[in-house]
Image (spheres, helix red, strand yellow):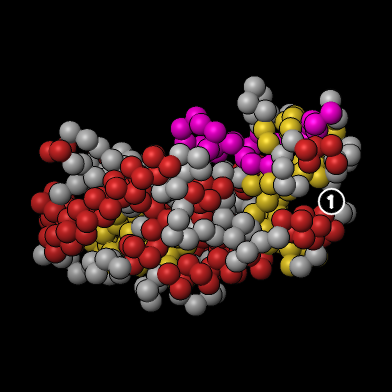
Amino acid sequence: MAIDRDKTRDRLDRATAHLDPPYAVVDLTAFDANAEALAGRSGGKPLRVASKSVRVRELLTRALKRPGWHGVMAFTLPEALWLVRSGVSDDVLVAYPTAHRGGLADLAADPALADAVTLMIDDTGQLDLIDAVCPPAGRPALRICLDLDASWRPLGGRVHVGVRRSPVHSATAAGALAAAVAGRPGFRLVGLMSYEAQIAGLGDAPPGQAMLGSAIRVAQRGSYRELLARRSAAVGAVREHADLEFVNGGGTGSVAATSADPAVTEVTAGSGLYGPTLFDAYRAWQPTPAAFFACAVVRRPAPGLATVLGGGWIASGPAADSRLPRPWLPEGLKLLGAEGAGEVQTPLAGEAADGLRVGDRVWFRHAKAGELCEHVNEVHLVEGDAVVATVPTYRGEGHAFL
């Protein structure tokens, strides 16, 4: 969806004129358009919404009501239990292994929760921990998903392309772990997951870096070809020991490519609903910006400069400019290299600064999606030029899961 920045600024300013910054908004028209576009890219395979990238129950529910979306990928076990108990979903996959003893005890004590939540493992040590907390004889069978490492290791493994996740890389290792799960009481192996971060989470067209972009695209093509064969072999090896309900893969940046893998039955997406700045660097598809936060101008220190209160909402990951929030409205503002985005104040430079007065709003986009919600207790949902609802974030509901 094309976006007119001047009209968007005017619309957001009018919708939120009664609010005092800082605050966050989600444009529902853009959110819904992104949800529809992602579903259209999934080739008919269901999309599992990544709660880490949303962190607002109202918006998780909104996405799940749309065609093509089913189930949640949570980032912690306590979060997964809360989402089931509050009625967001009865199909929640925990994306990472857990060592949360209280959550495991709650899960094992409630057959309905045990039937709705799937735990992630990549090592038998995680099964040992579960058994130590809640012995298998006294619990319902717990649903288990194996995490297959999706990184690319060319040149005989001397090069590692991707993130450091599971130790389970080969089909042989996946089959061995599946056999171990199947041979232990109190567990039911139902899924396999692999996240190709080097494709789904890495933009292939970084601004102003054409050579780097070319290198990334070469690596992504090689990684994709290798993963197609290895994931298929791993699924075959695991299915010798269990009837899998699902094979999950991908993320916002690889929805179409991952869906094209015959071994995959569902794809995860979440960041594309909000459209943070990291996804501006993708050629195949860019979401419409839907989530913003506003800061107020409080100083005019010099011509060509305007300073807002706050603004230092920096994303996780490597310490780089790509993790900084981006001043987006009005167009033509930039951070100062010597100061960046500050906790209590952020000076902004550019011709647009001269048109700003004390009290005006500057609209920022966060580098990553759901992390924006860790800074606010609520988000204001905008349609057209009006706030139609104000809903709590995870933080606003009293939850800080990580």
In this view, the residue farthest toward the top is 338
Q: Amino acid at mark 1?
A: Leu
Q: Nearer the viewer, residue 154 or 23?
A: 154
Q: In the shown orientation, is residue 22 left or right of residue 368?
A: right
Q: Which residues are magenta?
A: 303-327
On screen, residue 298 above or below 24: above
Q: Is residue 275 magenta?
A: no
Q: In the shown orientation, is residue 220 left or right of residue 89?
A: left
- Element type at mark 1: loop
Residue 238: where, in percent of width, then height? Answer: 16, 60
Q: Nearer the viewer, residue 161 or 78?
A: 161
Q: Nearer the viewer, residue 378 or 131?
A: 378
Q: Quadrant of residue 255?
A: bottom left
Q: Quadrant of residue 92?
A: bottom left
SS assignment for the magenta stretch, majority:
loop
Q: Is residue 316 magenta?
A: yes
| Residue to which mark 1 is pinned | 19
